[in-house]
Amino acid sequence: MTQEQLQVLFTKDKTNWYQKTKNNIRIWDNAKVHQFWEMVRIHKIQKGDFNFNGFVFPSFAKSEEKKLQLGDNQFVLSFVKRT
């Protein structure tokens, strides 16, 4: 991805990434959410860049969501160390 493509991915509106149910629950496009978090890992976290000003965040990917439920420390280790 080019820097321009990354900028768009990280900062654009994400309302077209999900559909809302009758109960206002968001059903996210898993492929888009996964790509977003992979690019965050590769282009931000692995480089030690934790400046997320202007980012528009989608839902957590399902695997990260489950890890978060195990506790913050487990999530942080899994999130940062993933290869």
Image (tube, rainbow, N blue to C red):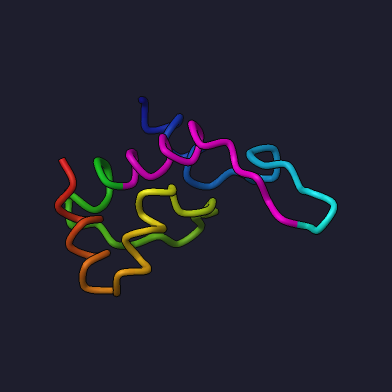
Where residue 56 sits: x, y (%)? 54, 53
* Quadrant of res 79: bottom left
Answer whether residue 33 is magenta in the image: yes
Can you say which quadrant of the picture contains the C terminus? Answer: top left
Q: Residue furthest top?
A: 1
Q: Is residue 82 above or below residue 4?
A: below
Q: Nearer the viewer, residue 49 or 33?
A: 33
The residue sitting at 85% across, 52% down in the picture is 22
Q: Is residue 71 above or below residue 19?
A: below
> Is residue 10 left or right of 82 when viewed as pictured?
right
Question: What residue span does the magenta drawing correspond to?
Answer: 25-40
* Quadrant of res 72: bottom left
Q: Is residue 29 above or below residue 68?
A: above
Can you say which quadrant of the picture contains the N terminus? Answer: top left
> Is residue 75 left or right of 5 when viewed as pictured?
left
Answer whether residue 64 is magenta in the image: no
Count of numbered labels shown in the rendering: 0
Q: Nearer the viewer, residue 11 or 32?
A: 32
Where residue 55 sits: x, y (%)? 49, 55
Where residue 46 sits: x, y (%)? 17, 49
The residue sitting at 51% across, 34% down in the picture is 32
The residue sitting at 30% across, 69% down in the picture is 70
Q: Main secondary structure of the magenta part?
A: helix
Q: Nearer the viewer, residue 2 or 33?
A: 33
Q: Residue furthest right?
A: 22
> Is residue 1 left or right of 53 when viewed as pictured?
left
